[in-house]
Image: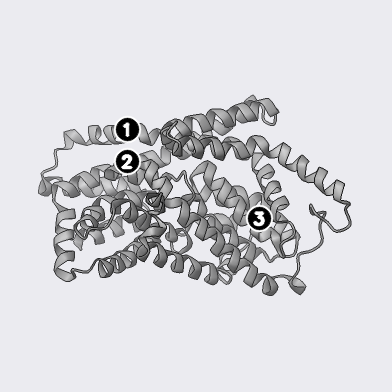
Amino acid sequence: MILGTSLILILLCGVPVGIAFTLLVIANAERWNVDWSVLPSITYDTVTVFPLLAIPLFLLGGQLMSHGGLIRQLTAVCDVLIGRFRAHLGHVMVLSSALMGAITGSSVATVAAIGSTVGKEMIDRGYSPGYTAALNASAGLLGVLIPPSIPLILYGSIVGVSITQLFLASLMPGIVMIVAFMIVHASLASRVLPDGKERSAAAVGSKEASVPAIVARRSSVFFKALPALMLPVLVLGGIYSGIFTPTEAAAVAALYALLVTVVNRVVGPRDLEKIFLSAALSAAAILVIIGFTSIFNRAMVLEQVPQSIAAWAITVTDSPLVFLLVVNVILLVVGMFMETNAATLLMGPLLAPTAAKYGIDPIHFAIILVTNIELGLLTPPLAANLYVAARTNRVPIIELLRHLGWFLLACLVLMALITYVPQLSLWYRLF
């Protein structure tokens, strides 16, 4: 309790997450019998493991796709596929977020990229900025659930479970989340749109267009977007077929995105320099957190904190169902106050051994933990998705929150399904 209070106080003082963990270890080094001389080697050994190389490479691929205009091509394809749906542009935002998530593995990057493209178009079509930002922030969660996922890479690396299996396990919950958001949007569209309809636009499939013109336009959209569409197929197909490891797939994705961007001549040498720098800074921020939190996790292991948690939990209840309920509540609170990657690195090693004591499948528990923590992206005070969506769509955060409730409820229902229906995550074992 004292340890947790100290950590919260340090974070509230504005100390960066990774440094806060390290300060806590240094302050308690003598009591925990931690040798200061090994701290640098712990950090270095943690961030130089092969699986973590996937993080900067996936981020680079996402940056190249975004700056190279390939994201707009993906949204155009989604527009073609569901252009006849009522209030279809909201569905386009959801599907585009899923495709972006399959490229970057980052929720915040997904919100920023899709909000700056589809979000602007939604507002032009008659949606309020507040509703557009709420949908944008919520659909951004697909950046974590739809593989590849940076938090799942972190979890697999630090807990020691197969990252490929984690990607497979997150696929079905991700699809269910897509459907859930589309249902919520379809239900709310009549309330948030004037007369329940989007403003007219030159949409593919317009009734005034002839059939040959419709076919020609759709074919043109698909042909232009073919390079962008091939990237998720290449990455996920390579991983699931066993051709690539997730890290090798990240390298292939970054190289492919670079080649497509250069061949299309949509960015110049100076733009490429900025893209590489942006990806490097984003990756560095994540890796610094990983390195410093590894020191804290090592100290917790030496102090046998995971074993103490397991022993305490078993004395409270012998029911796995009750344990999972308690874990869900704890993780929801943790996600509200901690950055997603840092929370995953902290709570994964602490709770995974306890979950194993209850006979909970390690892959299933990983999906529970990561999905639960990612809901913190929608719940203040941290709520990174909300702030990015508000800024991208130029709307006050209060206006966004007015429209968030139904999407958050859909997430909580999905969280309950993931927790108590293991087959939703372990579906791939049925074949």
Write the residue at 17% across / 47% down: 301
The image quarter in which residue 393 lies:
bottom right
Write the residue at 85% across / 59% down: 207
SS state under label 3: helix
Q: How far apart are marks 3 and 2 (CA)?
A: 33 Å
Q: In this view, does 259 lie to the left or right of 427?
A: right
Callout 3 touching callout 2 (CB < 8 Å): no
Q: In this view, does 294 lie to the left or right of 280?
A: left
Disc 2 marks which amino acid? Answer: Ser
- In this orientation, which residue lies closer to the viewer: 70 or 123? 70
- Earlier residue among tags 1 and 3: 1
Q: Name the residue under label 2.
A: 157
Disc 3 marks which amino acid? Answer: Val
Q: In this view, does 74 lie above or below 265?
A: below
- Earlier residue among tags 3 and 2: 3
Percent of width and height locating residue 293: 29, 45
Residue 49 is labelled as: 1
SS state under label 2: helix
- Earlier residue among tags 2 and 1: 1
Percent of width and height locating residue 413: 45, 69
Q: Mark 3 points at which residue?
A: 92
Disc 1 marks which amino acid? Answer: Val
Write the residue at 49% across / 37% down: 58
SS state under label 1: loop
- In this orientation, which residue lies closer to the viewer: 396 or 150? 150
Pick the quarter of the image with the N terminus.
Answer: bottom left
Callout 2 touching callout 1 (CB < 8 Å): yes
Report the mark closest to the observer, 1 or 3.
3
Callout 1 touching callout 3 (CB < 8 Å): no
| Residue 332 in view here | no
